[in-house]
Image (cartoon, grey):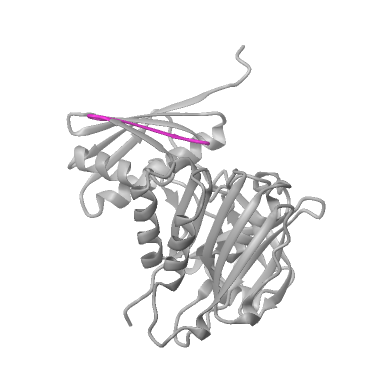
Amino acid sequence: MNATQSFKLSGLALASDAAKMLDEICEHFVEHAEVRREGNLALLTSRIGTASIRIEDRALRIELEAGSEKALDMSRTSIAEHMFYFAGDDPLELTWSESALRPVLPNLHPVTVVSAEDITPHMRRVKFACGDVSPFVGGDMHVRLVVPPKGRAPVWPGLRADGRVDWPQGEDELLVRVYTIRAVDAQRGELWVDFLQHPTPGVKTPGADFARDAQPGDIAALLGPGGGSLPVAGSILLTGDESALPAIARIAAEVPAGTRIRAIVEVQDAAEEQALPSAGTLDIRWLHRETYPAGAKGILAEATKAAIATMDADTFVWFAGEKDDARPIRALLKSRRHDRDRMYVAWYWERTSA
């Protein structure tokens, strides 16, 4: 018997334009996995497993392999969700060698609110009790927070036969938002999530509203984790705004001793600064938007680009924030041919023109 067991699954997608679909898959997943493209074949390799996708006439033949049944389910769901998203209004038929049908998602973790407190004027921390925190220790930091309607027993999502998530509708519709696990307290069986309380009047913020109103005993669930892995390097550049601050704080808290961290964090004012304890050596610069000239944009991006220009080639570059700030940073790293394994550049939100 092999020391490491492997789980496999086959799928077939009938798409109106298989070549375009494969192009979309490769373009998107390059940010989340190692992607190798050879003509009509694409191979995606990530920490949860591999996906081989090949064009056969109008169809896409999919072969998945992972180290556990749960990882295999996660890989199938990710592929299915993205395929239907890329198809848009075009017809798409997706079948698997084994039906994906599940009454409840395998990586859904029910949680209960333990406490909630403001840690700065615009950042609120909610602590959740979780029956098993082990999936959240190390590895990926991101989860989807799932909240049932007030006054109703939760109806949690399952899986459709084609691998997509089967979200409840109507009166049982769930609030779903992506957040970062700020910290894991394994001894207490608790997870911390920090919620930015947006100060902009008139902007709908259902996730922040949940945190504002959270009371001990409130029921929710966390779906994941997935994405946003902890960087491993002797030297790390961390930059971002308040939306990235929970992740920046967790990375700083969990790096091993001796790690050199340079951080640039944009917040509204000095009251939004947080202590960032770390076993590494941390050099942090806070940017305050209240000091910016009227209408100023891109200051965080420019500060990040200046920091990149002075760093060593083996530095891990980590950035998260607004979409228009992320784009020039990604372009700069590409032009410098920075090692893809030593970079994470993501946009967590998008500024509207209104």
Q: Quadrant of residue 129?
A: bottom right
Residue at (46% x, 38% y) in the render: 75
Please state the horizontal and vertical placement of residue 35, each as a whole percent of the image: 37, 36
Q: If the image is split into quadrants, where does the N terminus sit?
A: top right
Q: Quadrant of residue 50?
A: top left
What secondary structure is the stretch in magenta mostly built from?
strand
> Eyeballing the image, is 310 above or below 62?
below
For the view shown, which residue lies furthest in the front direction? 310
**Residue 147 seen in render:** no
The residue nearer to you, when weighing 14 against 265, is: 265
Please state the horizontal and vertical placement of residue 279, each as a whole percent of the image: 74, 53
Please state the horizontal and vertical placement of residue 6, each as a whole percent of the image: 53, 23
Magenta part of the chain: 38-47
> Eyeballing the image, is 228 above or below 269?
above
The residue nearer to you, when weighing 307 against 103, is: 307
Residue at (21% x, 38% y) in the render: 18
For the view shown, which residue lies furthest in the top direction? 1
**Residue 177 seen in render:** yes
